[in-house]
């Protein structure tokens, strides 16, 4: 089955979906029932709006003349967010740490991870107290999420699949936090959440959201002038953050970096030299320079990763090199830059991005996390969970039951410490 | 005619021009939006809620103005609504013992076996893979566009698309024998 056949199969299936003639009536009935029973249905306002609009009624009337005189409804109900979900006690069982798809550590020993569960319909939350060697289940998310950040052993957030979810009890219970989107950065106890402009309407100004209480409450920064397209955010301290994004709605450039040094009270803008056609960007800081990767998707989904560095906080940029591999998701461990290159594993650079070496191979997408001052953890499917203090020397903390031992030629220098 | 609720919950007076504009948008985009939502959900009955939710957002945005190209905006609203659908389902689950559920009308045309098999295959995919596969191969969007819509990295789109395609291939191959 090739992609065209799949398109035809999906189109054929979708063609069988027809709007029921009594949609508006059923929607209104459902709204009233739910509102009276729960007072907590976000979609209620919406359903009634559809039912009450002249537009909806007129369209439906064309399908069913008997509905042409349907009465509209009025509501002033405000959307509400469901409260904490109680998770039943979870049995311990065998956990394959290589399958962890999101990682976060709060110190050298205590860390958390997410594992796909229920056929990847939900995420299982797991915890380690010995640096990743052993894991136990502590909770479950409603949606499968792909990002995780814990500020301490109690407070953390998960995001990436559904809305951002917040825990204050070590991952046992989670609640949704509505205003936050899926681009997060953090530094020194402060989280930054970016809402990139990805809709093809004039984008204009949006704030970045900041949380100093691990995602429980959020406040707005000064407005950020955004263009249409992918964006990335990097925080290097409580006061300093960078947002790289298209400067206009042209989508493929020109690109700019917005910088704040005062905790979001103000932003300054400088152009970045990502070439025309850049589709996404990645940014990292190694205490010496900012490293920027501009990723372009070519025909056949081949990508190029042109990189630039700045040693004056993004004011000026100089071209550095090309990053090999399938992708370029940048991070840093101390002064070593790491590029998560997708299914080709991790690359490292110790010369501020001028040259790259394979440091940890992988045959599938890997998950990484860095705890400043401690090191980097990486989960590699069907291999295991690896740890490095410097991004160059790796220790296998937990082996996957399906592991194929790596060869000495593919791992830089095994470290038993 | 009664008014509709505003962003702050007050009731606004009806506006024939505004409603007429929405009528045009609704008429043009409702059916494609419903089909997209059905595929993203893997379930046409859930799609109705998602599309109602999406069109309310569109309605609010149209009232405020500034939507130059409605199609992509509706698509983004549908994707957002489907991704937020867990909240509705959570409430439904919590109140399942107190709510009388009315059986939905059969959204399929009767007797189309292949369609049912495709739907069953779609439902077997994890939600993330299903969304990527539908946006990539049904909507024919580029990886970058899918990443933008779902607000994930392009690498995630690549990985999810490859896994989803392989899983669908495997499921439908088994079907074919």
Image (spheres, rainbow, N blue to C red):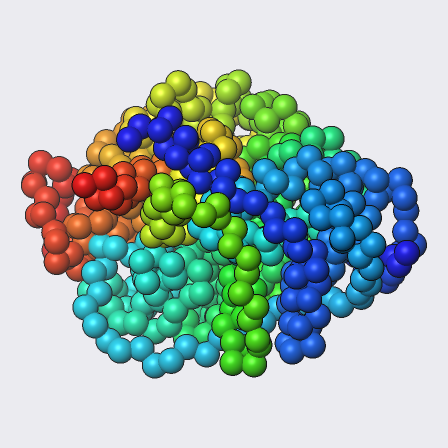
Quarter residue B165 falls in: top left
Name the image quarter holding the C terminus of chain A: bottom left
Q: Can residue B113 be seen in this view?
A: yes
Q: In this view, does A297 lie to the left or right of A74?
A: left
As drawn, is A261 to the left or to the right of A132? right
Q: Position of residue A118 (x, y in %)?
A: 32, 62
Residue A99, position in %: x, y?
25, 55
What residue is at 26 percent from the left and 78 percent from the top?
A: A91
> Which of A333 and A135 lies nearest the eye of the viewer?
A135
Count numbered badges in the picture.
Answer: 0
- Residue A332 is situated, as x and y percent measured from the top left of the image, at 37, 43
Between A307 and A84, the residue placed more toward the observer is A84
The answer to whether any part of residue A392 appears in the image is no
Residue located 30% across and 72% down the image: A137
Classify the position of the N terminus of chain A by image quarter.
top left
Q: Which residue is drawn at the image coordinates 22% and 49% (left, top)?
A: A381
Q: Residue A223 or A280: which is nearer the viewer?
A: A280
């Amino acid at each position: 089955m090739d992609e065209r056949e799949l398109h035809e199969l999906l189109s054929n299936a979708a063609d069988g979906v027809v709007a029921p003639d009594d949609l508006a009536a059923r929607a209104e009935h459902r709204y009233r029932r739910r509102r009276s029973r729960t007072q907590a249905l976000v979609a209620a306002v919406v359903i009634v709006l559809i039912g009450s609009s002249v537009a909806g009624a007129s369209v439906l009337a064309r399908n069913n003349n008997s509905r042409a005189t349907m009465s509209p409804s009025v509501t002033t109900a405000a959307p509400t967010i469901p409260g904490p979900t109680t998770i039943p006690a979870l049995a311990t069982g065998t956990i394959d740490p290589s399958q962890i798809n999101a990682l976060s550590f709060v110190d050298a020993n205590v860390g958390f991870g997410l594992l796909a569960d229920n056929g990847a319909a939900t995420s299982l939350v797991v915890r380690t107290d010995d640096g990743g060697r052993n894991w136990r289940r502590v909770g479950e998310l409603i949606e499968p999420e792909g990002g995780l950040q814990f500020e301490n052993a109690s407070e953390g957030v998960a995001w990436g699949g559904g809305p951002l979810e917040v825990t204050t009890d070590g991952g046992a219970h989670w609640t949704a936090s509505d205003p936050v989107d899926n681009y997060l950065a953090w530094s020194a106890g402060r989280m930054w959440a970016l809402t990139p402009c990805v809709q093809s309407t004039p984008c204009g100004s949006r704030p970045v959201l900041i949380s100093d209480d691990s995602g429980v409450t959020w406040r707005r920064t000064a407005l950020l002038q955004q263009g249409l397209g992918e964006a990335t955010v990097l925080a290097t301290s409580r006061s300093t953050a960078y947002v790289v994004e298209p400067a206009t709605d042209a989508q493929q450039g020109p690109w700019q970096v917005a910088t704040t040094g005062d905790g979001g009270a103000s932003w300054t803008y400088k152009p970045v030299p990502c070439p025309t056609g850049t589709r996404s960007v990645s940014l990292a800081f190694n205490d010496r320079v900012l490293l920027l990767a501009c990723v372009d998707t070519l025909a056949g989904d081949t990508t190029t990763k042109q990189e630039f560095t700045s040693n004056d906080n993004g004011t000026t940029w100089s071209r550095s090199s090309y990053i090999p591999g399938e992708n370029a998701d940048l991070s840093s461990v101390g002064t070593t830059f790491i590029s998560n290159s997708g299914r080709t594993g991790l690359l490292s650079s110790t010369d501020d991005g001028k040259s790259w070496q394979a440091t940890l191979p992988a045959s599938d997408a890997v998950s990484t996390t860095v705890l400043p001052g401690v090191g980097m953890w990486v989960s590699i499917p069907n291999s295991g969970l690896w740890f490095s203090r410097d991004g160059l020397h790796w220790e296998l903390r937990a082996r996957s039951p399906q592991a194929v031992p790596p060869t000495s030629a593919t791992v830089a220098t095994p470290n038993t410490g | 005619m009664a008014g509709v609720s505003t962003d702050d919950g007050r009731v606004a007076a009806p506006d024939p021009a505004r409603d007429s504009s929405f009528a045009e948008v609704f008429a043009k985009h409702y059916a494609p939006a419903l089909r997209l939502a059905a595929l993203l959900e893997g379930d046409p009955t859930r799609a109705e809620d998602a599309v109602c939710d999406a069109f309310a957002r569109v309605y609010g945005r149209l009232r405020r103005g500034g939507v130059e190209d409605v199609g992509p905006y509706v698509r983004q609203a549908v994707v957002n609504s489907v991704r937020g659908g867990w909240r509705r389902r959570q409430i439904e689950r919590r109140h399942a013992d107190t709510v009388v559920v009315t059986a939905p009308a059969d959204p399929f045309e009767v007797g189309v076996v292949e369609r049912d098999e495709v739907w069953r295959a779609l439902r077997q995919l994890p939600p993330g893979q299903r969304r990527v596969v539908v946006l990539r191969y049904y909507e024919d969007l580029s990886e970058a566009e899918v990443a933008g819509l779902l607000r994930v990295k392009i690498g995630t789109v690549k990985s999810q698309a490859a896994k989803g395609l392989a899983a669908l291939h495997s499921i439908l191959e088994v079907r074919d024998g």
